[in-house]
Amino acid sequence: MSDWKKLKDEHTLRLTEIYQDKSNPQSLRENAFHALTHRFKDDILKKCEIRCKRFGHDINVAEQVVTATFKSYAEKGKFEINPEDEADVDYLFVGYLVGIVKIELTNYYRQQQRKLNYPYDGSEEIVTDIPDVDGMEMNLEQQILIKAIHSLTPSQRTVYLTYKQYEIDGFNLPNKLLKKLREHLGDVKQPTIRGLKKEALDKIKNYTSAMEVTKEFYNGRV
């Protein structure tokens, strides 16, 4: 990576062109990116600190956001300008990066909110079957649902009941629980889990549809 210094005096536009052209050798692109980071990191950090202070964040948050900003540019950046703007390229590139800073600050805020509202505590366990309901008084909907669940294969039932127990809108099941689920089913991959979940939901839906027809029949509509 020490070769980046050979590019330290290269024009900013040229550095972005080198980096963004994926046909260039990877080592050359990495050196161009490192030269851009070296040139603009302090400037972006200062601007990021100002924005972070407005929201009560300290220097550590600013540094995290700056790192995320350059990472975002590294992954999908496409800085482009018109030829007549070449004289202002440094100013425009900083503005481009500040635009990414705004996005990354929003992402940071959302991540913090998710942590504050995270609904899982690590005690979650896979659910393999429903409790014994013999003798319990149930309405028609509940009876149909029980029959639907019993119609599932053991694997489908475990996946369905585990998700039914723990799935919350806006959150993925915790990794620890998903690992237990995959291991319980024979060290399957996550796509297999998704497939079993869909199969189970489709079966449940079929039973629910049949329930609606049955209700209409009992209501004298058929």
Image (spheres, rainbow, N blue to C red):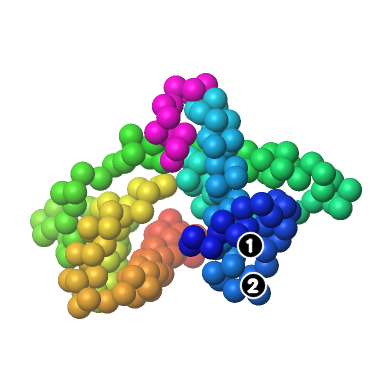
In the picture, the disc for residue 19 is 1
Residue 148: x and y in percent read: 29, 67
Q: Tell me if 72 is positioned left or right of 213 in this view.
A: right
Q: How many marks?
A: 2
Question: Label 1's element?
Answer: helix
- Three-letter code, disc 2: Asn
Q: Do the residues labelled 2 and 1 touch (CB within 8 Å)?
A: yes
Determine if the magenta segment contains residue 80. no
**Nearer-the-camera pick, 134 or 58:** 58
What residue is at 58 percent from the left and 31 percent from the top? Answer: 47
Q: Main secondary structure of the magenta part?
A: helix
Q: In which quarter of the image is residue 10?
A: bottom right
Residue 218: x and y in percent read: 39, 59
Q: In this view, does 196 lie above or below 42?
A: below
Q: Mark 2 points at which residue?
A: 24
Magenta segment: 53-64
**Nearer-the-camera pick, 201 or 72:** 72
- Three-letter code, disc 1: Tyr
What residue is at 13 percent from the left and 58 percent from the top? Answer: 131
What residue is at 19 percent from the left and 49 percent from the top? Answer: 122
Residue 71: x and y in percent read: 51, 52
Query: What distance separates the C-alpha of mark 2 from that of mark 1?
Result: 8 Å
**Nearer-the-camera pick, 58 or 40:** 40
In the picture, the disc for residue 139 is none
